[in-house]
Amino acid sequence: MLKFSTYEGGTVRVRRVGPRFEFELMSAKGEVEAFVDMSSDDAWQLLANLGEELDS
Protein backbone atom coordinates (compact mmCIF):
# COMPACT_ATOMS: atom_id res chain seq x y z
CA MET A 1 0.00 0.00 0.00
CA LEU A 2 1.14 3.54 -0.76
CA LYS A 3 0.16 6.36 1.57
CA PHE A 4 0.48 10.08 0.88
CA SER A 5 -0.29 13.09 3.05
CA THR A 6 -2.51 15.87 1.74
CA TYR A 7 -2.02 19.60 2.18
CA GLU A 8 -4.97 19.70 4.62
CA GLY A 9 -3.59 16.92 6.84
CA GLY A 10 -5.55 14.06 5.30
CA THR A 11 -4.22 11.03 3.50
CA VAL A 12 -4.53 9.26 0.17
CA ARG A 13 -4.08 5.50 0.30
CA VAL A 14 -3.52 3.43 -2.83
CA ARG A 15 -3.88 -0.35 -2.62
CA ARG A 16 -3.56 -3.01 -5.26
CA VAL A 17 -6.34 -5.58 -4.95
CA GLY A 18 -5.82 -8.31 -7.52
CA PRO A 19 -6.17 -6.76 -10.97
CA ARG A 20 -7.60 -3.49 -9.60
CA PHE A 21 -6.48 -0.50 -7.53
CA GLU A 22 -8.35 1.17 -4.69
CA PHE A 23 -7.82 4.86 -3.95
CA GLU A 24 -9.12 6.08 -0.59
CA LEU A 25 -9.11 9.74 0.40
CA MET A 26 -9.27 10.39 4.14
CA SER A 27 -9.84 13.72 5.87
CA ALA A 28 -7.57 14.98 8.64
CA LYS A 29 -10.23 13.63 11.05
CA GLY A 30 -9.81 10.12 9.58
CA GLU A 31 -13.14 10.13 7.76
CA VAL A 32 -13.39 8.62 4.28
CA GLU A 33 -14.14 11.45 1.86
CA ALA A 34 -13.85 9.48 -1.38
CA PHE A 35 -13.24 5.94 -2.53
CA VAL A 36 -12.36 4.97 -6.09
CA ASP A 37 -11.97 1.45 -7.49
CA MET A 38 -10.05 1.43 -10.80
CA SER A 39 -8.76 -1.09 -13.28
CA SER A 40 -4.99 -1.51 -13.33
CA ASP A 41 -4.77 0.11 -16.77
CA ASP A 42 -6.67 3.20 -15.62
CA ALA A 43 -4.72 3.46 -12.36
CA TRP A 44 -1.36 3.22 -14.12
CA GLN A 45 -2.47 5.88 -16.62
CA LEU A 46 -3.54 8.16 -13.77
CA LEU A 47 -0.22 7.72 -11.96
CA ALA A 48 1.77 8.21 -15.19
CA ASN A 49 -0.14 11.42 -15.94
CA LEU A 50 0.47 12.64 -12.40
CA GLY A 51 4.19 11.97 -12.83
CA GLU A 52 4.24 13.90 -16.09
CA GLU A 53 2.43 16.82 -14.47
CA LEU A 54 4.88 16.88 -11.57
CA ASP A 55 7.83 16.90 -13.99
CA SER A 56 6.51 19.86 -16.01
Image: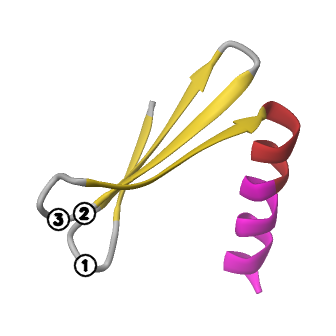
Which residue is rendered at x = 68% and y = 13% of the image? 18
What percent of the width, then of the height, locates residue 22? Answer: 57, 36
Q: Are marks 2 and 3 in contact (CB under 8 Å)?
A: yes
Residue 39, image x, y percentages: 80, 34
Query: Which sits earlier in the primary sequence, circle 1 or circle 2?
Result: 1
Q: Which residue is mark 2?
A: 27
Secondary element at image label 3: loop
Quadrant (top left, top right, bottom left, bottom right) of the N terminus: top left
Q: Which mark is residue 8?
A: 1
Magenta span of residues: 46-56
Where is mark 3, residue-wise?
Answer: 28
**Dominant secondary structure, magenta:** helix
Name the amino acid, label 1.
Answer: Glu
Judge by depth and name the residue closer to the eye, 51 or 42.
Answer: 42
Q: Mark 3 vs mark 1: which is more N-terminal?
A: 1
Q: Residues within 10 Å of mark 1 (few under 14, many from 20)?
A: few
